[in-house]
Image (cartoon, grey):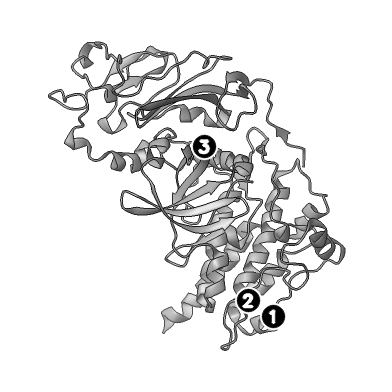
Amino acid sequence: MRPLRRAARGAELLCACDVPHCTASTCAGKVCFVSKSREQGHVTRSRGCFSRHLLENCRGPVMEHFGTRCCNASMCNARLDVYLQGAAGLRVPACGPWASCAHPACVLWASRGHPVCISCASCAILHTSPVHPVCVPCASPVHPVGSRPASCGPVWQDLLNDDCTTGSGSGLPFLVQRTVARQIALVECVGKGRYGEVWRGVWHGESVAVKIFSSRDEQSWFRETEIYNTVLLRHDNILGFIASDMTSRNSSTQLWLITHYHEHGSLYDYLQRTALDSAACLALASSIICGLVHLHVEIFGTQGKPAIAHRDLKSRNILVKSNQQCCIADLGLAVMHSQGSDYLDMGHNPRVGTKRYMAPEVLSEQIRTDCFESYKKTDIWAYGLVLWEIARRTAVNGIVEEYRPPFFDAVPSDPSFEDMRKVVCVDQQTPVVPNRLYSNAVLAVLARVMKECWYQSPSARLTALRIKKTLKKLGQALEKPKQDE
């Protein structure tokens, strides 16, 4: 397989930068931006750059409290400014047949000077420069400044409408996310980890999950934000993304990732307190592999997506939904690959995956870092370990074992890289599969699958699609006797 070329950085622009992830007064990217926010009468302006994947996210509504503008020349954002809704001095010029519309929320900034007429729900979408204002009628007669026609419905319903997204990602329009984050009330901390906290929040009466990243894991937040905003990841078995925000609380900067909330928590927590039957075991295993297949497969077309390898798959990064299906979370270490451009996007995260779940080629430092298939194979190794965790908690003839993490009997609770390398690479150990699993039709198949995920040679391991087909066939075989009854 020929090596994949990495992203060329020579064509990047130099932009003025004063946001927290900048290490200097400038940054390099494909698009420069300036944003402005207003909180309690205080106006804050930020400047920075987006990678080329975030170009579409220069589009989004200008709100009363937040707005942004983008440009595409070196240091072009140094003197660029943003005018928020209702700001003093903002004038809406006459625009021919649209001159009757005087509401600032109905101003559209159209590229290349072409007038664009849009619906009320899409008012005030900001396009890339140059800036030419036009007016869009929202209702007739003209509504007064500061009001919103009843026919448009509540603002948050507009934001959740699928047609209001940028079209590139799976969350809300990039700039609307900043407004959404300010409307969330944090209720309770539901989890803490090495890289931050997870809180249950409430937004418009609904529970949402808010992952607050620590400052040392800023690159993971930035990577997840980039992927969720640029890749179409809507799938039942991928954690649903709502918004991302960089906010200030208690005089410190916090990095938020806002997602759907699942009260059962992570698969790790769920297995600690829940014993499974074979049907529930198969449902969990099948839903995880369905999510992994969606990540691994490249989808072509306007609604497509690049192939993605997770690189940190484990039971703590898998959530259990109310219907006992799973969804995969935490894409902070993910890599993306597009066949058309032969482009391998590694991101810029110095973090490594979880040592306990690392494949032999990662621990021995022999993985081909220029080959995307290599990263997919490490996900399969980790999936086999997750499968083992699930199977151990499945009752057979009334017998079920307590939850234990993979290699619990071979390494310490917080194993070092060397601990894992010795066990996995030198001794070539794999978790012990309990004999009782082979007396159950479902678990016997899962035992065989997990062993085929653990070959030392990456090329010998099953693919996610092959596993999905095997488990689907197994599920159909179990359903057939029920239908015959």
Q: Which residue is mark 2?
A: 392
- In this view of the protein, which residue sits in the foreground, 403 or 125? 403
Is residue 194 placed above or below 467 in the rendered structure?
above
Give the residue furthest to the left.
141
Left or right? Give the position of 482 relative to 48.
Answer: left
Callout 1: few (<14), some (14-19), or many (20+) C-alpha neighbours within 10 Å? few
Report the residue at 60% width, 46% height from top. 332
Q: Residue type at mark 1?
A: Pro
Left or right? Give the position of 203 relative to 261.
Answer: left
Badge 2 or badge 1: first in the primary sequence: 2
Q: Are marks 3 and 2 in contact (CB under 8 Å)?
A: no
Q: Are marks 2 and 1 in contact (CB under 8 Å)?
A: yes
* SS type, badge 1: loop
Q: Which residue is mark 3?
A: 230
Q: Residue type at mark 2?
A: Arg
Left or right? Give the position of 125 relative to 70.
Answer: left
Give the residue furthest to the bottom.
397
Is residue 218 placed above or below 464 in the rendered structure?
above
- In this view of the protein, which residue sits in the foreground, 482 or 254? 254
Report the residue at 59% width, 60% height from top. 316
Residue 434, numbered label: 1
Q: Position of residue 414 (x, y in %)?
A: 72, 62
Report the residue at 33% width, 26% height from top. 124
- Give how far apart the Cα atoms at labels 2 and 1 are: 8 Å
Q: Position of residue 251 (x, y in %)?
A: 50, 38
- In this view of the protein, which residue sits in the foreground, 186 or 206? 186
Which of the image's four quarters has the N terminus?
top right
Q: Position of residue 206 (x, y in %)?
A: 34, 53
- Give how far apart the Cα atoms at labels 3 and 2 are: 38 Å
Q: Is residue 295 visible?
A: yes
